[in-house]
Image (cartoon, grey):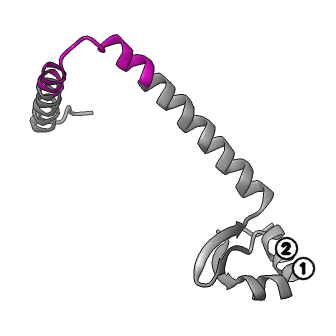
Amino acid sequence: MSEQEPKTRVLKASEARQNFSQILNEVFRGETRVIVEKSGIPVAAIISAADLRQLEQWEAERARRFKVLEESWQAFKDVPVEEIEAEVGRAVAAARRKAREESQRPAKAS
């Protein structure tokens, strides 16, 4: 497999069809990813199985994180949006104040 990130190529569907075997070899070796266009519109992508596994892992992680968010939103379903926004604003201001204070402290001698 290639050490570098694969390059992305855009091909017309007819060109991809004509060179399919070569494209598959380049994708397999990690050299390229291909976006296939039909009438100038991207309709498909040819990526390696490793790229697909990574995409599936990212999708699963994203779904897990959104599930956590949805669960946390349920805890505040009866709290008015304005109250939540005000509390978030106070928390952000406090975090910024703390970060500013910490950045202004003299460094400790080793």
Dot 1: element: helix
Q: Is residue 55 above or below residue 21?
A: above
**Mark number, residue 32:** none
Q: Name the spot of residue 75 as percent of width and height, x first.
A: 35, 11
* Residue at x 55% of width, y 34% of height: 63
**Mark number, residue 24:** 2
* Residue at x 68% of width, y 45% of height: 56
Disc 1 designates what residue? Answer: 21
* Residue at x 85% of width, y 73% of height: 24
Q: Is residue 17 left or right of residue 12?
A: right
Quadrant of the drawing holding the N terminus? bottom right
Q: Are marks 2 and 1 in contact (CB under 8 Å)?
A: yes
Q: Relative to the observer, which residue lies in front, 86 or 51?
A: 86
Occupied quadrant, residue 47 = bottom right
Q: Is residue 52 above or below residue 64?
A: below
Q: What is the span of residues highlighted in magenta in the rendered image?
A: 70-88
Q: Is residue 63 left or right of residue 71?
A: right
